Amino acid sequence: MSVNDDFNNQLNAKAQFVNDTLSRLVAAQTDIAGDLKEAITYTLKAGGKRVRSALVLWCCELIEGKINRNAEIAAAAIEMVHTYSLVHDDLPAMDDDDFRRGQPTCHKAFDEATAVLTGDALLTLAFEILAKEIDNPAVAVRLIGELAQAAGPAGMIAGQMADLKAENGQGGREILEYIHTNKTAKMFRCAAAMGAICGGAKDSEFDRLCEYGLKIGLGFQVADDILDVCASSEHLGKTAGKDAKAGKVTYPSVIGMEESKIFGEKLADEAITALEPFGQRADRLRDLAIALLKRTK
Ligand code: GRG
């Protein structure tokens, strides 16, 4: 078995673990009306790579040597927030997409109002489970703060606003880095931070993992921009070639394809450098940095 196969198996195992947790958490919400629950379940069951939640689990494992229940909850929470962002991003008022995770988007399978509310429900449910299920109030407050900050108006929402404004190809590398750092990288940093908090990381370990998360998050987005040019919709499970069509600023459009690949490698190298103090314990995270760079979907 190659290192790559082994890594993919590990990621799939983590995805399965998170999927099971999400199913259990949603099933336990007996007060949600049937039609809303159907849309929430449809959206979460579509899967996805679960990279952010795997990162929470791996960072906790790195620090504590195992996954604890708090990390399990934090992983589910970040996946709910990420999934909400995709549901809203696919709406006609935003990116207007028909296809996500290999199936019709939420507003296509149901309707626009249901998709708005499904996104709202996932976002708020994430914070509800953190508040109710984390076994230590101080840890819960830190996790809630990290997730709110990363997903909020100085994070993902800021990135999305800037992205919408930058359509028609306006803006150079600086604005591009601002968009992708806020829209994508801060959620990766947050995943690493949440895993570190759940594992009980020291400040120096926390800082290293956050730096690693931010770097691989930006690298992930560079790879996403490259894939949008190179891969097919069928393979990606979402509409390919949309960025160029929408006149979006992307790494290939601003710095060219070759430079984009070089930049992605530089970010992976920097991420791996941040892991140095952890030695071999961080091998899984090193594999993740490399896998994100080489990913094909
Ligand atoms: C609507 C507030 C709001 C924000 C939307 C995340 C986002 C911001 C938009 C989604 C579109 C996009 C291209 C975002 C960049 C981040 C990204 C590559 C998301 C897709 O993440 P993957 O590839 O998706 O991890 P899966 O389906 O595997 O979870």
Image: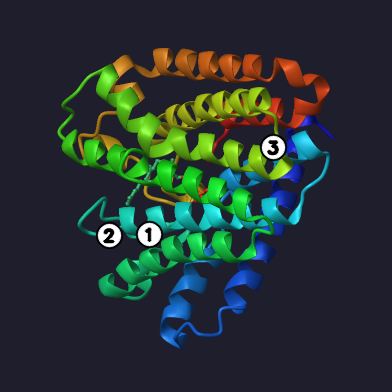
Relative to 263, is 95 on the left or the right? left
Instruction: Classify residue 196 as left or right of residue 112.
Output: right
Q: Provide the secondary structure element on which disc 2 rests.
A: loop
The answer to which of 107 and 65 lies nearer the viewer is 65
Q: Quadrant of residue 73?
A: bottom right
In the rendered image, is residue 205 in sight?
A: yes
Measure the C-alpha gap from mark 2 to mark 1: 7 Å
Which sits earlier in the primary sequence, circle 1 or circle 3?
Answer: 3
Does the residue tagged 2 have its C-beta within 8 Å of any atom of ligand 1?
yes
> Would you name the residue on which mark 3 appears?
59
Residue that label 2 marks: 91
Query: Which of these two is toward me, 178 or 227?
Result: 178
State how far apart marks 3 and 2 are (Cα): 33 Å
At 44% from the left and 75% from the top, the residue drawn is 39
Name which quarter of the figure residue 155 lies in: top left
Residue 237 place in picture, x, y as percent? 47, 52
Quarter of the image for residue 158 reads top left
Q: Label 1: few (<14), some or many (≥20) within 10 Å?
A: many
Q: CA distance from mark 1 to mark 3?
A: 27 Å
For the residues bearing labels 2 and 1, Cβ distance under 8 angstroms: yes
Residue 47, x across and y down, in percent: 56, 59
The residue that appears at 42% across and 14% down in the rendered structure is 258
